[in-house]
Image: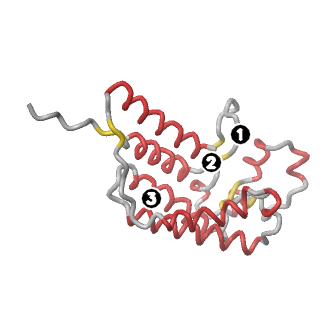
Amino acid sequence: MILLLAVAAGLFISLVKAWVGRYHFSYPKFRDLSLVIAAVFPQLLAFYIPPLRSRFSESWVVAIVVVSQLLLLTFIVRNASLPGFPLLGLGLAFNFLVILLNGGMMPISPEVVSKLAPGAFLSGIPVGSRYGFSKDIILPRADTSLWILSDVLLLPVWFPHRSAISIGDVFISVGIVWFLATLTKHPDPSPA
């Protein structure tokens, strides 16, 4: 959800710049854009399409998360000169590191889950299991490697979809806003 809000904010800034300042859109030339498609498509199947997501075993989920992260990191490195991409890369690297160190899924503590879901729901989910159909695995803070990089930050109650995010997600979001906000460029002055 926070990434969608980052996209919306970045596009809004670009549109306002274009409207108020008569800026023009400048579309970047991405290198290896197919890596993003290859990374996102399996995640759509495994996490976001209800009839399909229950068919993926935990080992497949781990493989999809790890391979997707590698593909996205490769894309970011190949396009590191674009505005905001260094922050995107740092956020992805933080997420990838904590995912790798914790068995291939993003750790989330029982305490954070209890703030997201009623206590009765949490009591039915054993520690070490996947949290719903997400990329998260429920791990106590003491059993989580680099817990500070895991999903430890709760979005405010007033957010439309309450969830937990990581520090990496914050860097990714800022990088997205920065990148999209720079899609508009001031036109070159006309020769006199």
Residue ID for mark 3: 89
Residue ID for mark 2: 165
Quarter residue 184 falls in: top left
Where is residue 117 drawn, in percent x and y? 81, 44
In screen coordinates, is 141 left or right of 100? right
Where is residue 64 drawn, in percent x and y? 65, 70
Which residue shows up at 55% across the image and 64% down it?
37
For marks 3 and 2 on the same chain, the one whose residue lies earlier in the sequence: 3
For marks 1 and 3 on the same chain, the one whose residue lies earlier in the sequence: 3
Task: From the viewer's side, name the closer residue of 48 and 138.
Answer: 48
Label 2 crowd (10 A; few <14 / some 14-19 / many >=20)? some
Quarter residue 13 falls in: top left
- Return the mark for residue 44: none
Where is residue 140 drawn, in percent x and y? 73, 58
Spatial separation of the CA atoms under disc 3 and disc 2: 16 Å
Amino acid type of the residue tagged 2 in the rendering:
Ile
Spatial separation of the CA atoms under disc 1 and disc 3: 25 Å
The quadrant of the rendering that contains the C terminus is: top left
Task: From the viewer's side, name the closer residue of 122 and 163.
Answer: 163
Spatial separation of the CA atoms under disc 2 and disc 1: 10 Å
Amino acid type of the residue tagged 1 in the rendering:
Arg
Q: Judging from the image, what secondary structure is the residue with disc 1 in?
A: loop
Which residue shows up at 39% across the image and 60% down it?
30
Which residue shows up at 77% across the image and 52% down it?
110
* Residue at the limit of the structure toward the top, as seen here: 20
Where is residue 95 drawn, in percent x and y? 56, 59
Q: Judging from the image, what secondary structure is the residue with disc 3 in?
A: helix
- Return the mark for residue 162: 1
Label 1 crowd (10 A; few <14 / some 14-19 / many >=20)? some
In screen coordinates, is 82 left or right of 134? left
Which residue shows up at 45% across the image and 57% down it?
90
Amino acid type of the residue tagged 3 in the rendering:
Gly
